[in-house]
Amino acid sequence: MRLAAVRWLVAAFLAVPLLGPAVVPAAQEPAARVLYVRAGTLLDGTGGPARRDIAILVRGERIEKVEPARSFPPPAGAVILDLSGKTVLPGLIDCHVHLTGELKKGWEWEPVTRTPIDAGIAGTVYALRTLRAGFTTVRNLGDEGGASVPLRRAIEAGLIEGPRIITARRSLSITGGHGDDLNAFRPDLRLAGVEPLDAGVCDSPDACRAAVRYQVKYGADVIKLLATGGVLSSGDELGARQLSDEELRAIIGEAHALGRKAAAHAHGTAGIKAAVLAGIDSIEHGSILDDEAVRLMKEHGTYLVPTLMAGEAVENLAKSGEMPEFAAAKALAVRPLMQQSFRKAVAGGVKIAFGTDSGVTPHGRNAHEFELMVAGGMKPMEAIVAATRSAADLLGRARDLGTVEPGKLADLVAVDGDPLAGIAVLKAPAAVIKGGRPVDLGRDEGSRPGGRP
């Protein structure tokens, strides 16, 4: 009897895998959401000519088809978004923002009055403003205590709305440099709970490599270094070089070894040239360019991210008396230098990617940069490409972003009017789509052009 029972149990055990699939049905994948967008005019981000009456078919997060609307009707079950009276472009990309802060009176005291929690909470508001302004992707170049990392995670998890964030976390600075939070404070003062590496200050090649690794360990997608002095820092000169050749090579080399790009805050000519020769991917601001700097940037394929809005903003604050004394003279000096250098870069064929330094200016007004770029010598189409295809290339995300093409993420922005005839129309999006989902622009239903599917 015992042997018979054992044989029965073995037979039953062996039979389970054979019987299982017959009784347990396979789980069905939910059908991807299908969105059919009809665009009156499409500027696809490639720099090619405008196309009229185009249909964009989106399945899930990605674009499946971009063809003349007459070529194919909406498929059954698709959600239809009629933008036939609008100009549609790729979702815009801002390559230089600070989403977790905004320049306000008393900002110079924030290192000792504001916590990363304050910064992160503020960032939830600024992120939504930025997305509603048509910017579906941003590169966040510096924050307080890594606050942009949980902000990025919250957006990716769908807890809050905001743009895709590519973040540098903390910027890397020399002691007493543009990014040293404790400049001009008592020498015995320390920020409670902040590790030296987390402060982003490094003073040798080895220390700089460790600082890069620390930022990457805690979530940095890109590395930001401070190659010269800055406007909003005490005790340094605007154009003075910071970081030695060896330190620059250590930071940039380590970033590239870890699969990250590197961006350099650089106003002064010597710092710009040194960063370019060390292999930097982008120069931020580039306020004091000479002919050699332009030539080097073009030869090395280095991007300029001009941030003309920041120059305008600090000049206005200085003129109104709202800038601390240590920054006012630098603020008044930098604006005309930035304008002159931008014109030189455009004329010299330097690659340019769109960036605003928002945070120095109020978040959500990013598209004003287009006006300044066009006033500085760029054609409207060139400025648009700087915020789409070129920006995606700089970020290393050209496979997914920057143009309206099949296979790309379905990030779109629609505006009334023709931005090629008047670039200012980009300041008032009529519709924004991120990853195939329309964004609530925060207006009354009756005033939301194009409707909301």
Image (cartoon, grey):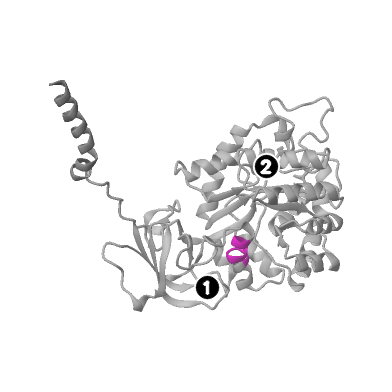
Task: Please state the total of marks drawn on the protein image.
Answer: 2
Tell me the mark number nearer the camera, choosing from 1 and 2.
Answer: 1
- Residue at image coords 60%, 46%: 99
- Assign the C terminus to one quadrant of the image: bottom left
Secondary structure beneath label 1: loop
User: What secondary structure characterizes most of the magenta part?
Assistant: helix
Q: Position of residue 62 (x, y in %)?
A: 43, 60
Q: Which residue is mark 1?
A: 418
Q: Position of residue 203 (x, y in %)?
A: 83, 39
First to last magenta residue range: 386-393
Magenta run includes residue 408: no
| In this view, 390 is above or below 215 | below
Disc number placed over residue 3 in the picture, else none: none
In this rendering, position of residue 394 left or right of residue 175 = left
- Residue at image coords 71%, 53%: 263
Query: What amino acid type should be assigned to the residue bearing mark 1?
Result: Asp
- Assign the N terminus to one quadrant of the image: top left
| In this view, 49 is above or below 292 | below
Question: Nearest the camera: 216 or 96?
Answer: 216
Question: Nearest the camera: 61 or 217?
Answer: 217
Secondary structure beneath label 2: loop
Question: Nearest the camera: 92 or 109?
Answer: 92
Q: Quadrant of residue 297?
A: bottom right
Judged from this view, the residue extending furthest toward the top is 2
Mark 1 → mark 2, Cα distance in angstroms: 34 Å
Q: Position of residue 47 (x, y in %)?
A: 58, 74
Q: Are marks 1 and 2 in contact (CB under 8 Å)?
A: no
Q: Is residue 344 visible?
A: yes
Query: What amino acid type should be assigned to the residue bearing mark 2?
Result: Lys
In this rendering, position of residue 240 left or right of residue 366 = right
Q: Is residue 242 visible?
A: no
Q: Which residue is mark 2?
A: 104
